Amino acid sequence: MAAVLEFDCLTKEYHSFPGRCLRALDNFSLRVEPGEIFGFLGPNGAGKSTAIHLAMGFMRPTRGSGTLLGQPFGQAAARRRVGFLAENVALYHRRAERLLRFYGALNGMAGSRLDQRAQKVLEMVGLHEQAKRNVGRFSRGMLQRVGLAQALIDDPELLILDEPTSALDPSARVAVRELLLKARSAGKTIFLSSHLLSEVEMVCDRVAVLHHGKLVCTGRTTDLLAAGEQLELVARGIPAGLFPGAVAENGVIRFSIPASAQRATAEAIWSKSGEIVSMNPRRRSLEDIFLEVTSEADKEDKVQ
Amino acid sequence: MKPVVLIAVNFVREQRWPIFVLLLWVLLLAFLGLITEVPRGRDDLLFVFKQVAVYAVVFSIFFGGSAIYNERRSRRILAVLAKAVAREQYLSGLVFGVTLACGIYCFSLGITGSWTLGQAGFPALQVWFLMMCLLAACMLAGTVALMFSTFLNPFFSAGATAFLLGVPAVASRTLSTHWGYLLPVYSLTATVLKTTFDSPGSVTWLPVAWAFGETLLFWFLAARIFSRVDIAVAVE
């Protein structure tokens, strides 16, 4: 199946006077398949927005290429089928409804379809009661929701969202999350760049972590979370020094072990006449994985 | 074509306050027409008319030179170019927008001028011809400024435009008047400035047509340059 979004060995360098060069993306390759929610993660300055801007045709790569809905980056015809929300939403100051009609019309929409769609997307983002208000008087969160509405106006096949929930309150975040899940079940593809790892963990089928312009980790969210599964063990009747990392508290000791060491550890405790109080799987979060892979990448960078 | 019109109308809407300020000058001319004893003060009226007319060319350079910069700085350009809008369409919209803004001004000045100067015996049709010359000059000057603004900030693009438009002006004064047609902004503006009640000037459409042709050329150049610009990079 053809990729919806594909980066192929992309490098992007920013040159500034006098002869300074910053490599924002370094030989970056990635495929986003149809119908998935893809989480695009990375620390500040990792190159996420650069990658998105290259895909949208706002920039030209220094080397490499890529395709958006089967067409090379920068084609207006491909962007017709894409909804984009920038990290810092900047929109013209006019009534929300009119603004959406303006963006829809830019995409070739017209007539009653455009009017109905403008109403519908405002309802989807919970701003239908603010339709007649000027966007210039909106709060940052409301502005982000109008931004999301303009991305959705033409019912796009692919949504590219750069930090879509950063300014939203918890209830609006839940609403956006549900909206994304609904879009996926309707067959849409979503490319989501976010710092909110718990959100990404909840909605994304696959994730990729970018660090210093390089892809350091990619895979299915469930696989990444399951990999290196650990067990948290509480035991009593044995000294804490017997197991590395064990902490004694309230007459028991606590420590973590790899799932594969479960039997051997239990037997070791029993052989010392100890007693296992509890043994529970310790779930890794996306945050753990993120910190792990980025710090490993940092170490590798230092070695090099 | 639809995105071009939408971007142009949006540009005029965004520039509504400068346009409004420009129109105040036209109102001033109308006011002078009301209070002046026309047969005695007709030369003064013509002087004010010419002065107000030339403002349009200056404003077209500012409109053209700052359009892309303002949009990039506010980052509003991203939401527009994220839609099915090609960069050449975007630039066409801005050229059309600058022309539309100057057109509103020229039309208002044409109405006021044909009324005030008409009272003093100036042929009204000639006023509309002068407005056509002015609009062509504005369109070309705005497009040249827009072309420079694809890679320069507004200050430098206005300077570069003034320099480029000034070279044929100087050459036409020192060498031969034919040099004025190289970039006919000066010769078109001079047509407006040199007109008098005694010699309203002959209607010559060649420089107007030439200006339209050169506008297309500079639009093409601007589009070629703009297609290579990283618009998401901060402009400061």
Image: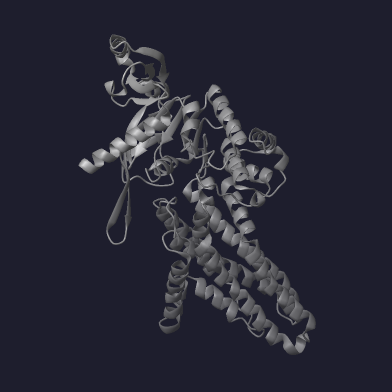
Q: Residue furthest bottom?
A: B40
Q: Which quadrant holds residue A218?
A: top left
Residue situated in front as seen by the camera: B61 or B180? B61
Residue situated in front as seen by the camera: A187 or B39? A187
Residue situated in front as seen by the camera: A87 or B187? A87
Q: Residue at x 29, y 40 (%)?
A: A298
Total of numbered circles in the picture?
0
Q: Residue furthest left?
A: A304
Q: How is the image coloured?
A: one colour
Q: Residue at x 46, y 38 (%)?
A: A195
Could you tell whether A17 is left or right of A282 in the image?
left
Q: Quadrant of the C terminus of chain A?
A: top left
The answer to whether one can see residue B5 in this image is yes
Could you tell whether A87 is left or right of B127 in the image?
left
Residue B63 position, x and y percent, is: 55, 64
Q: Which quadrant holds residue A16?
A: bottom left
Q: Is residue A192 depicted above or below B170 in this figure?
A: above
Residue A72 position, x and y percent, is: 39, 37
The answer to whether one can see residue A29 in this image is no
Residue A112 position, x and y percent, is: 70, 35
Residue situated in front as seen by the camera: A233 or A26? A233
Residue A281 position, x and y percent, is: 41, 18
Q: Quadrant of the N terminus of chain A?
A: top left
Q: Is residue A288 depicted above or below A185 in this figure?
A: below
